[in-house]
Amino acid sequence: MTADVTRRPIRARDTKWAAATARWLARIGLRPNQISVLSAVFGCGAGTAFTLTGLVPSPTARTLCYVLAAAGIQLRLLCNLFDGMVAVEGGFRTKSGAIYNELPDRFSDGFTLVGAGYVLSHLSWLPEVAWLAAILAVITAYVRALGSSAGAQPCFLGPMAKQQRMAVMTAAAVASAVAEQFDVQGHVIAAALIVIVVGCLVTIVRRCRHIIRELETS
């Protein structure tokens, strides 16, 4: 079967467990657009959990918040996987599916990254870095959408596409949960946000160059 170049390449899509889960979701009545909205709920929940780490007093509570943030990010990504599978493989595409596929992701990115900027009040510059990361994440997705609207194939080039951004934040959340025991709270998140900012800038440049080259040579 020829790969659909308009879909983001995800290895898990071809696994048996993913196919079985997608069929189960369709059987219980969940539709792609509902799953897409649910992804935003989990993404916003992850951002809320990050923010709460700066408000709760005890290391145990902060550790729990970091774990919840990591779980929210991963559940969001699972929703991103299954909404497409239920839509395409399950035969439940809708005319408005593209809107539901994109818009919840922008809210998820924004809430998750901005929320991470408030993990500790003593890092006064961290919120600005988090907001910059969120803005660049949106621009990264916008470049892809802009290229598609201009007639190019969807460009999913990295190094800091959605999956990579969320992998960095998940790893940072888990590492921060451990770091609570070593009094370096928040610094792992700060490093992760800086990595995302730099990675998004590189990704934007790479996508722009790729899209422009494709349009000019087609």
Image: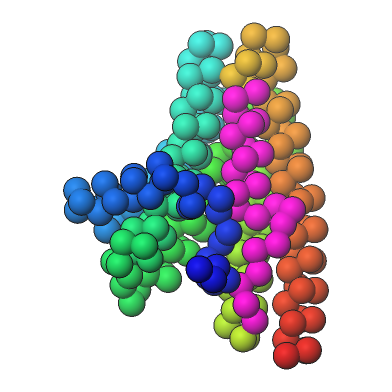
Residue 92: image location, x then y, percent: 29, 66
**Picture quarter with the C terminus:** bottom right
Question: Please, which colouring scheme is shown?
Answer: rainbow
Residue 55: image location, x then y, percent: 51, 24
In front of the other: 114 or 35: 35
**169 drawn magenta:** yes
Q: Residue at x 19, y 48 (%)?
A: 28
Horizontal side of residue 177 vs 189, given as left or right: left
Q: Is residue 124 visible?
A: no
Q: Is residue 59 above or below residue 68?
A: above
Q: Residue at x 62, y 40 (%)?
A: 167
**6 drawn magenta:** no
Q: Quarter of the image holding residue 3?
A: bottom right
Q: Quarter of the image holding residue 155?
A: bottom right
Q: Residue at x 54, y 71 (%)?
A: 2
Residues rendered magenta in the picture:
152-175
Q: Quarter of the image holding residue 147?
A: bottom right
Q: Is residue 90 visible?
A: yes
Horizontal side of residue 150 vs 158, given as left or right: left
Q: Residue at x 65, y 63 (%)?
A: 156
In front of the other: 66 or 117: 66
Residue 56: image location, x then y, percent: 49, 19
In front of the other: 190 or 39: 39
Residue 27: image location, x then y, percent: 20, 51
How many marks can you see? 0
Q: Is residue 187 above or below residue 63?
A: below
The extreme front residue here reads 1
